[in-house]
Structures are given as structure tokens and as C-alpha cells.
Amino acid sequence: MVDHIKFTTEIAEDWKSVLSLVHHDEYNHCIKRIQDASTSSQLQSKLWLVSEIVNLGINVERVALLAGWYANFITPLLIDELGVKYILNLEIDPDVKTLTYKFNKRYKIDKDRTKNQNVVCLYRCEMHDVMFEPLKYGNFDLVINASCEHMFPMSRFRKLNKSKDYIYVLQSTDDEQWDDHINCVSGPEELADQAEIVDVMYSGEIELNNGMKRFMVIGR
Amino acid sequence: MNNILCMKWGDKYDDSYVEKLKEQCEANCSVPFKFWCFTDKPEKDWHIPIPTTLDKFYDEDRGFFWAYRKCYMFRHGQISGDNRYFPDNSKFLFLDLDVIIHQDLKYFFDLPNDKPWIVRGWWNDILTVKRNYAKHKSTPLNSSAIVWNKDQMVPVWNHVVDNAEVVFFTSPSLDNYLAHHWYDPWKEDEGFLQGFPQGDIYSWYKGNVFPHDMEKKKIREDHKICLFNNSTQTEGVNTDEIKELW
């Protein structure tokens, strides 16, 4: 079971630079969201996600992260625990791009680091609405969407990218109290149905520290 | 050819709103124009029937304020069963029914036509717009007034039709949809749509320009149009407050 993040000096440096940035006027409006992305419940759901991938023994090198937000927890977890080599975070919020690169600066594509061949992983964030356009590059092992409650059902993503045989890792909730939870589900079965997953490798639910019920499905 | 369009469906506004808007346009436009009303109850020769092809995508239970019928104005072709058509050089000014016109509408037909124009709600705090962008809240745009040349908005129509299921599910309003797909709050000069400049259009319920001119329920006659659109109102409910100012 994966139950912690390795809080290295590099992480400390990157996360501190986020805090410095959001105290400038230009990014002041992001403070609340940075707090919301840094809760124990956020970490809990990402630890659960990575733990189950480890348990399934899935070999992952390239990950498409849909609506990954700041990817502050999931990026180091995927790299440290699964040895992932490349993560592409597809987002719609331009402020996220700046801040997620701060959070994950140590992994951002860097010409000098690439030349030195010391790079263990590359992290990239692109502005791309995955419910309207197919992925530009298709060679991913895993598609993670831990924000399904905020989006149209994943069947649409499958339709747009129908030639690809990805393994999907999906999370959602039945917590309807928030305006932006536009697609809550009753349980992991409905989540799998929405994504037209027929080969279910994992299905489960947990209650997060904030009381929210979280569902997860892994499968094809 | 200049055209002023409006749209009326359901019972939120009575016929007096259409008549009053037409009267205001006739009193405040110094260039020739034709006035048209898209309506679900066509009775007059300047009425155009509203199609229903998008109705099946609208889910009333979601509680979204989806003025999707406005999208029909952006199509290239004629309305089915209606033999009228707009010539290629047509210009359009759409106005919501609940507006007060203060100045000559010629201004809108004389605007440069490199891009369509829409109300940029300058009363919005742009930081709130950015903060709520991914939540599909706090849109900076308001579709109560739009200016375009014939076919200039066809890409919007095509995008809505091609993605109707997702668009209707995800976007709580037409304004929100337009702000996400055809405008960029981070680079306001670079979107497909451009906002009318400050000083053109203000809101009765929300103010004029954030943060320094935000007094509500104040008439500003040096502006061209006052909007009464209030997205906090429940769909189908109208206070008729505007009638006291006609």
C-alpha cells in the first residue's frame, strides 16, 4: 500500500515557489484553489489510486492525465511509486498551467536535462478540452481521470479516441452538493457503465477524510 | 443590409416587450434596417419561426439557463419552411427584449467587422472570472447584444450542433459556452469574439465597470444600451421592472 509522498528537498523547493507565486497580485485569486488541491482528502484519493495500480501490477510508462488540475500529488506518486516516464496533463484552465509547472518544476521538460539524459520523467501540461477534441498523441498506457464528476461521461472520450486501447483509471463521487459536480454517479458500477468499461480490473469505494464518498474503477 | 433581431419564446416576456423594442429601434437608429423577431408564435411578416431541432438536447431538470435558441440566428441556411433569406452583405444586431436603448444604433453597424462583437460584462471582476473558469461560473460575456456579419457566426452554430450533447450537459448557459469556446479571458484581444468597449453597454442590475463604476439601478444615458438581463433570476420569471423605465 502506498501511504505517503516522498517529501524531498526538490519537492520542498517547488512547492515553496508555488506559495511565493500565489502571494503576488496576478495569482492571488488562486490561493483558495491551491488550498483545496492540497487537502488530506486530495492526497488520500491519489494514494488510493496509485496503490491499486501497484496492486494490479500494471506496467505504466506513459500517462494521460485528464483534468489533472495542479497534479501536485499525483505526479510524484506516479513517478516515485510506478516509475512512470511521461505524464501529460490535459487541462482547460490557463492559470493551472503556470501553477502546475511550479509544483512539478523538477519534472518539466527541460532541454538541458534531456541532453544530460538524467531525466527519469517528463511532465507536461497542455490546454486541451478532452471532451471536444481527441488526444493529439495517442501512445499512452494509462488514462487517468480523477475528476469525472466535473465532466461529461467518459464514453465521449472513448468515442473521440476510439482506435486506442487504453487502461482507464477513473474516480468520481455521489456528492451532489457542489455546483461544479455536474456528473455525479451512484457508485463504481455506474462510473464503469458511463465509460463503457467491460473489463473491470478494479472497482471500489472509500470515504475520504472530508466525508466525501469516492468511487474508483480501473479497466478497459 | 442592416438587420436588428430579437427573440421571444415562452411566456417570460409578453408581446409588449417585442413591440417596445421595435419602437425603440425605430426611434434610435439613423440608418435603414429591417426588424425581425424569432418567435415560437409567428404571426406577423417580420416574425421568423424558431426551429426546434436543438430542443431534444435541453434538459430542464439540470436547471441550466440555456438560451440555446439564440444559436439558430447563427446558421447559414434558411429556416425550414421559411422562404426568406438574408443577402450575403447582411449585418446583424441582436438585442434581448429587456434592454433600454439610449443612443443611435448606427454605431453598431459601423463597427469594424473583422470579428463578431458581444457584450463584455465590464462589471465583472476578471479575477473572479478566472477563479471560476473551470467551474463554468462567472462568465465575462453576455449575449444580450451581439453584432456579426452574415455567416461570421456559422462556426459557432456548427460547433454547437456537432457537440450538442456535451455542450448542453457541460455549459450552464449560452454566455458560459461562448466564453469557454469562443473567447479567452486571459487574452481578451485574441478570441473569436470581441467585447464591445467600455462605455457602450452597462447592466441595470450589476453596474458598469468593475471596480470604480458599479452603482446598480442607475441610468447612464451617455452609454448606448442598458441591459436588464439578470442571470440570478429564475428562468421564466421576470420582474417587469424595466417597464417603469420605458
Image (tube, rainbow, N blue to C red):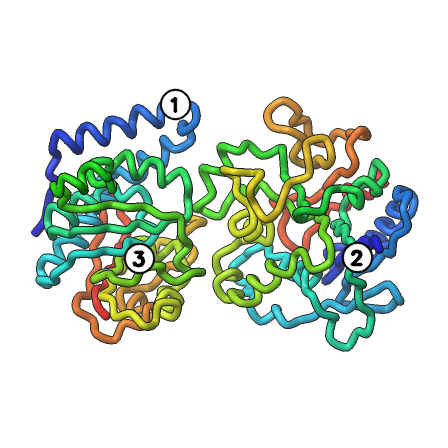
Question: Quarter holding the N terminus of chain B?
Answer: bottom right
Which residue bears the numbered disc 1?
A24
Q: Quadrant of the C terminus of chain B?
A: top right
Amino acid type assigned to the residue bearing label 2 in the image: Ser
Neighbor class of circle 1 (other Cα within 10 Å; few <14, some 14-19, many 20+) is: few
Disc 3 residue crowd, few under 14, some 14–19, many 20+, Cα 10 Å: many
Q: Are the two marked residues, 2 and 1, in contact with CB atoms closer than 8 angstroms? A: no
Ranked by sequence position, the earlier of labels 1 and 3 is 1
- Residue B141 drawn at (x, y percent): 61, 43
Tags 2 and 1 both on a single chain: no
Q: Quadrant of residue B224?
A: top right
In this rendering, the label closer to the viewer, 1 or 3 = 1
Q: In this view, does B141 lie to the left or right of A72?
A: right
Q: For this rendering, which residue is in front, A78 or B237? A: A78
Residue at 82 percent across and 52 percent down: it is B17
Circle 1: element type: loop
Q: Which amino acid does label 3 sit on?
A: Ser
* Between marks 2 and 1 in the image, the one whose residue lies nearer the viewer: 2
Closer to us: mark 2 or mark 3? 2
Distance Cα–Cα, label 2 vs label 3: 48 Å
In the depicted structure, whether residue B28 falls above or below residue B14: above
Residue under the image location 82 percent in, 70 percent down: B84
Q: Depth check: A163 or B42 in front?
A: A163
Would residue A24 appear left or right of B157 to someone viewing this image? left
Q: Mark 1 lies on which chain?
A: A
Q: Name the residue under label 3.
A: A172
Judging depth in this view, the residue of A154 and A32 nearest the camera is: A154
Residue A34 percent location from the top left of the image: 32, 35
What is the chain letter for disc 2? B
**Which residue has dot 2 on it?**
B90
- Label 2 CA crowd tier, 10 Å (few <14, some 14–19, many 20+): some
